[in-house]
Amino acid sequence: MMRNPTPIPRILLNNVSCMRNAQTVLRDINVSVHDGGALVLTGANGSGKTTFLRMLAGFCAPSAGEILWDGHDITSSSGVYDQYKLLLNWLPLKDAIKEKKTVLHNVRLFEFLEGKQGRSMEAIEFMGLGRLANEEARLLSMGQRKRLQLARLLAIDRPFWLLDEPSVALDAEGVKLLEYIIDAHRKKGGIVIVATHQQIRIEDAMSLRLPERFPRRKTLVDMLR
């Protein structure tokens, strides 16, 4: 009886390194994620978590190794990358919110650019911003701005999420909502890669701790121990 072949990982990083300003930020990274999988990136400030996400988003290229999506190197062909980027949902630390536009407009704009419609209000209400839908975004608190970013994720609904510090500024209820939407996305076969300093409950997630690039200098706190 023939066995079914093991499926190739949806995303595979093979001996990947990355340089920034002539310095190596990431070195010899090997990781693979299948559909429904999650990877949590941790590490000290400056260890390369955001660079890791930006590299996967195609904003910077690896200096060595290869990044494969469905077995195809996303850096070797513009055609491969053009197809790959249509699957990405990138949530950066900077929110790119238009201050003088309403909450609803800020989500609908992303939906419009995606060629979709009809999910914005549902996403806004799910993230607890329904009563603020017609308010200008400049009036939002930091936590509400993060919820607005997450509403964009839901409205666009792409399969591969890259999340940079998604829980920053969220209250306890907001973190639970974040954990819920990550879990729901994975149950649909979506992939989530998260860079975080804070605890986020993600069931069966793989973890990759990036090493510090520079030795930490002793501080007054160390001397007092």
Image (cartoon, rainbow, N blue to C red):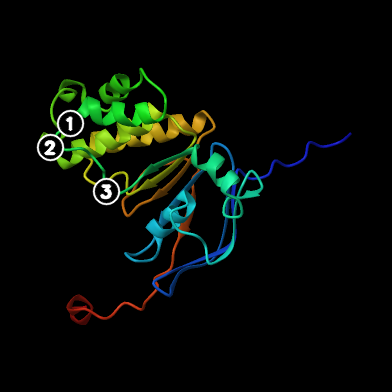
Above or below, 15 against 77 in this view is below
Q: Amino acid at mark 2?
A: Arg
From the image, tell me which residue sits under label 1. Answer: 101
The percent coordinates of residue 120 (x first, y second) are 31, 23
* Residue lying farthest to the right in this orientation: 1
- Between the residue at mark 2 and the residue at mark 3, the CA separation in whole angstroms equals 14 Å
- Between the residue at mark 1 and the residue at mark 3, the CA separation in whole angstroms equals 17 Å
- Element at badge 2? helix
Mark 1 crowd level (few <14, some 14–19, many ≥20, 10 Å Cα): some
Pick the front one: 130 or 37: 130
* Between discs 1 and 2, the one toward the N terminus: 1
* Between discs 1 and 3, the one toward the N terminus: 3
- Element at badge 3? loop
- The numbered mark at residue 138 is 2
Q: Residue at x 58, y 50 (%)?
A: 74
CB under 8 Å between discs 2 and 3: no
Q: Residue at x 70, y 41 (%)?
A: 7
Q: Amino acid at mark 3?
A: Lys
Q: Residue at x 17, y 31 (%)?
A: 101
Mark 3 crowd level (few <14, some 14–19, many ≥20, 10 Å Cα): few
From the image, tell me which residue sits under label 3. Answer: 94
